[in-house]
Amino acid sequence: MPYYGYYYGFDWTYLVLVLPCLLVALWASHNVKATYRRYSKQLSARRITAEQAAQRVLSSAGVYGVRFEHISGSLTDHYDPKTNVIRLSDDVYGSTSTAAIGVACHEAGHAVQYAQSYAPIKLRAAIIPVTNIGSKLAMPLILLGVLFSSFGSFSYTLIYVGVACFSLSLIFQLVTLPVEFNASRRALRAIEDGDLLTQEELKGARKTLRAAALTYVAATAVALAQLLRLLMLFGGRGRNRRN
């Protein structure tokens, strides 16, 4: 008996569920890079650098002691809560572009979240170790379950545990969404309140952060599609076998 979704060796669940989301994710990745390139050419009239703007975001929230470091790569910017360091990439560090300012202030928004004990980012940090373990175990457990399908309920247990482990990836993505949206809102609000950019320049920073946010939405869609696919492929097989 074939697994649900497989007909004559063709997996229609991948074509219908996963592939469209992957295409959206590829588009989102291309879009954020294109948007960043576009607004990296729009320089701040006030000549404020990305690091200086991020410092203003931090000070406006009463957060101090955060260090800044230069890191290689493109759009590899991130805040490291363990060392309390904001790392800015080659394209962002020292730049006065509206795109760079938006990215740096977004990372400052994450630092503010930790400083103010923003609940979703605390939750995300807490589940990272479990999510990492689950993502590594998910597919091996599912494959073992398929290989040992002749062992009946034991194989189904392996598959279901594997699917449960994979679901942790979706949970992580769902928790990540409010964290990223909130960091961007904090950044844009601080930029506007501090008059760091003109209204026209603020549009560039906003569009850059919006494009970045879409990549997280796309990643969540991919994780959801993959989980639905696994449930469709394996969810009904055990019930059918028992009937």
Image: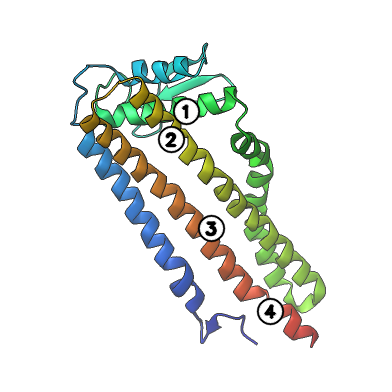
| Proximity of marks 3 and 1: CB atoms separated by less than 8 Å | no
Q: CA distance from mark 3 to mark 1?
A: 26 Å
- Residue beneath label 1, please? 109
Relative image position of residue 207 (x, y in whole percent): 30, 41
Q: CA distance from mark 4 to mark 3?
A: 20 Å
Quadrant of the rendered structure where residue 202 is?
top left
Q: Quadrant of the N terminus?
A: bottom right
Q: CA distance from mark 1 to mark 4?
A: 44 Å
Residue at the top extreme of this rendering: 65
Relative image position of residue 176 (x, y in whole percent): 54, 43
Q: With 215 as the anchor, is 123 left or right in this view?
A: right
Picture layout, residue 231 above or below residue 122: below
Q: Secondary structure at mark 2?
A: helix
Q: Residue at x 69, y 59 (%)?
A: 164
Q: Nearer the viewer, mark 4 or mark 2?
A: 2
Give the residue type that dot 2 points to.
Answer: Arg
Q: CA distance from mark 1 to mark 2?
A: 8 Å
Quadrant of the rendered structure where residue 189 is?
top left
Q: Which mark is residue 185?
A: 2
Q: Residues within 10 Å of mark 3 (few under 14, many from 20)?
A: many
| Proximity of marks 4 and 3: CB atoms separated by less than 8 Å | no
- Residue beneath label 3, please? 223
Q: Earlier in the sequence, mark 1 or mark 2?
A: 1
Q: CA distance from mark 4 to mark 2?
A: 43 Å
| Proximity of marks 3 and 2: CB atoms separated by less than 8 Å | no
Q: Residue at x 30, y 21 (%)?
A: 195
